[in-house]
Image: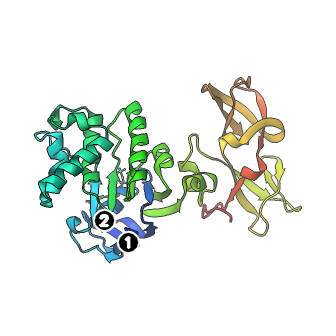
Amino acid sequence: MAEIAIKSVAKSFGAFRALQSIDLTIADQEFMVLLGASGCGKTTLLRIIAGLETPTEGEVWIGGRRVDRLPPRERGIAMVFQNYAVFPHLTVFENIAFGLRMKKLPQAEVVRRVNGTAELMHIEQLLKRYSGQLSGGQRQRVAVARALAMEPDVILMDEPLSNLDALLRLEMRAELKGVLAGSKTTTVYVTHDQVEAMSLADRISVMNGGRIVQAASPVEVYRNPAARFVGSFIGSPPMNFLPATRASDGRYQVAGLSLPGPAGVGQLLEFAIRPEDLSMAPGGLSAVARVVEPLGAHTLVTTEVDGALFRAVLDSDVRISPGDELSLLPKPDRVRWFHPESGNAVV
Ligand code: ATP
C-alpha cells in the first residue's frame, strides 16, 4: 500500500510563497499527473514528496508513514528526471544496477532485476553498451528501467519525456503507460504538456499559482472544469467564454442568443463552450469568420462574436471564407457556466 497524503503543505522560498496550502491524496497504484504552466509549483511539490525539499508547513505521508522529515532514501521512492541522470561512464547494466548495489542486494537478485526491467523497457540488447553512446530515447529507457528495478512503492517523474523529439515522445508515452499500468507502483508525474497529462493520468491535478485548482479524471477536467482557468488551460484550442446576462424571463442572453441557464446564481455569468461543441446551424451565435485553418480531420475557424475572439472546430467539409457571417449553435448539454468574479464553475 502506498497511498500518498499531502496535508496542508506550503512552501516559501524567502518571501515568495511557491506553494499555498496543498491538500491532495493520491491513491495506492494511482497515476497522478501534476499539470500546470511554468512556475506554478509542480516541481516543488514533487520535490517535497521526494524529500529533496522540506515543506515550510504541513505533512507528507506515504503508505501510512509520515515522511516529511525522512531523507529521500527512506521514503520507498524512485525518481526519473528530465535530464535522465544516467551515468555515461557506466554500462547500461551498471546504470540499472546502481541503486540495487547501493542497497547491497545479492548479485543474483541484481541480475534478475536488471534483466527483467531491461526486457520490459526493450533495452536488453543494450546492457553491455556504455550509456554515453546511447541516443536520447535509449537513455530515457535506461532511466525508467533503473527506477523500476528498485521496485519502489512510488515513482516520481519530472517531465521525463521533454528532451525527446515528438515521435519518440509519443512512442515512449504509450510505452510508459503500458509498463506502469502493469506495475503496482503509485506514480506522480509532472508535465506542462496537457496531451501527455490527458493520455497518461488516472487523475490530473491542475495547478496554478501554487494551488491545485482541480484534481479529477482527464475527462472530468476536460468536460467539467472547476474553474475558468482550467477550461482555458486545457484543450487546444481552449474553451470559449462570453458574458451572459439574465433576462426577466430567467433565461440568459449571450451575444443576442437566449439560452436556459442556472437559476438563482445572479444576474451576470460567463457562458462557456468548447470549440468542438459548436455546429453551423440556424438560431446560433452570430459570428464573423476571421481566420480559417483546415487541419485535415477538422477545420478550425477563428471568429468574432460581439467583439470577442471565439473559436469553432467544424467539419472539414465546411466552406467558409474570412468575412463570412456564421451562425454557431452550441450543443445544449455541453454549455458550462462560470461566476465572472471568482472564475469558479456554477455547480
Ligand atoms: P517549471 O515547469 O518551469 O519547472 P514548476 O511549475 O515546476 O515550473 P517550480 O519549479 O515548482 O515550478 O517553481 C515554483 C516557483 O518557485 C517558481 O516561481 C520558482 O521560481 C520558485 N522556486 C523554485 N525553487 C526555488 C528556489 N530554490 N529558490 C527560490 N525560488 C524557487
In this orientation, which residue lies closer to the viewer: 297 or 227? 297
One can see residue 308 in this view: no
Residue extending farthest left: 89
Does residue 199 sit above or below 246 in this rendering? above
- Residue at image location 37% in from the left, 59% down from the top: 185
Q: Which residue is mark 1?
A: 9
Q: Neighbour class for label 1 at 10 Å: few (<14), some, many (≥20)?
A: many
Q: Label 1, secondary structure: give it.
A: strand
Q: Neighbour class for label 2 at 10 Å: few (<14), some, many (≥20)?
A: many
Query: Disc 1, ligand 1: is the CB inside 8 Å?
Result: no
Specify the amino acid type for callout 1: Val
In this orientation, which residue lies closer to the viewer: 307 or 315? 315
Instruction: Look at the image and tell me in which quarter the C terminus lies.
Output: bottom right
- Residue at image location 73% in from the left, 61% down from the top: 268
Q: Residue 180 at what x, y percent from top left?
A: 39, 51
Specify the amino acid type for callout 2: Ile
Q: Residue 31 at what x, y percent from top left?
A: 44, 56
Give how far apart the Cα atoms at labels 1 and 2 are: 9 Å
Q: Quadrant of residue 169?
A: top left
Q: Label 2, secondary structure: give it.
A: helix
- Residue at image location 28% in from the left, 73% down from the top: 68
Residue 125 shown left or right of residue 282 in the figure: left
Residue extending farthest front: 108
Residue 283 shown left or right of residue 86 in the figure: right
Query: Mark 1 vs mark 2: which is more N-terminal?
Result: 1
Residue 94 shown left or right of residue 69 in the figure: left
Q: Which residue is mark 2?
A: 48
Q: Residue 222 at what x, y percent from top left?
A: 59, 51
